Image (cartoon, rainbow, N blue to C red):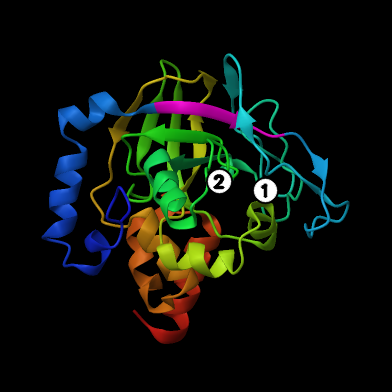
Amino acid sequence: MTGFDHTAEDKGSFGTTANIASTLWLAVPYRAAMKLLSVNIGRARHVPYTDQPEGLTGIDKRPADGPVRVAAPGPKGVGGSGLAGDDVCDTRHHGGDDQAVYAMAREDLDDWERELGRPLPNGSFGENLTTAGLDVSGARIGERWRVGPEVVLEVTCGRIPCRTFQDHLGEKQWVRRFTRKGAPGAYLRVVEPGEIRTGDAVEIVHRPDHEVTVALQFRAVTTERELLPRLLAAGAALHPESLAAARAYVDRYGG
């Protein structure tokens, strides 16, 4: 059983479980506990299992010592990671302003540890931020987090698993299993740049009044396309590719 229930808020009516969960996560005891367990960066290395033309990946991320500069990297296809010293090699699918930072809850990593029967150190999923006390996949699209005294990040979408991720972990049918779990972690854009470090507090400084969570967005773009029209409530805060997919679905099928 995962540390967070990512499905109840999406499968129930908007007036019940989702609102209760939101209220709980905004309560003072939870806010006080939210923090970074580690800030993780990875250097490019050659592997046999990536589709990147030169065979490079930066998915193997390790906790950084000391502060790490965070800034908007530029548009997708040009910009890489939002973290200084972190390599994004396949800029066709990764990096850029709307996927500048990837966060994963330690609680979800712990759940996978129990299921897989193996240790998963911080950074194992290629995440830049390993958090504690924060329901990352339950975050709403457009939700803003202040990390440390300077940085503000905005949630844009969930992480779509790929072959590189699967082979990096060495788990059979990993893409399918990760998708079925529905706790993808969150990509974020950089609203206010600055430095972050391990131990920094994380505070939710803005929570939109819609109910489009990362978990819902992930289901809509992977296994439950009929949910795509619901993503439109998140507006321009949604990752542009998901927003375009939702609009195209509505144009074709209505919504």
Residue under label 2, please give it: 98
Name the spot of residue 107 as percent of width and height, x first: 37, 42
Answer with left or right where residue 216 lies relative to residue 104. left
Q: Residues within 10 Å of mark 1 (few under 14, many from 20)?
A: some
Position of 131 with respect to 124 (left or right) is left
Tell me the magenta residue range: 36-42
Give the residue type that dot 1 points to: Lys
Observer-nearest residue: 61 or 17?
A: 61
Residue 236: image x %, image y %? 43, 52
Which residue lies at the image location 56% right of the left edge and 35% below the top edge? 128
Q: Would you say the magenta stretch is mainly helix, strand or loop?
A: strand
* Quarter placement of the N terminus: bottom left
Between 212 and 41, the residue placed more toward the observer is 41
* Label 1 sits on residue: 76
Q: Is residue 133 above or below residue 216?
A: above
The residue at the far front in this view is 117
x, y percentage for residue 234?
36, 55
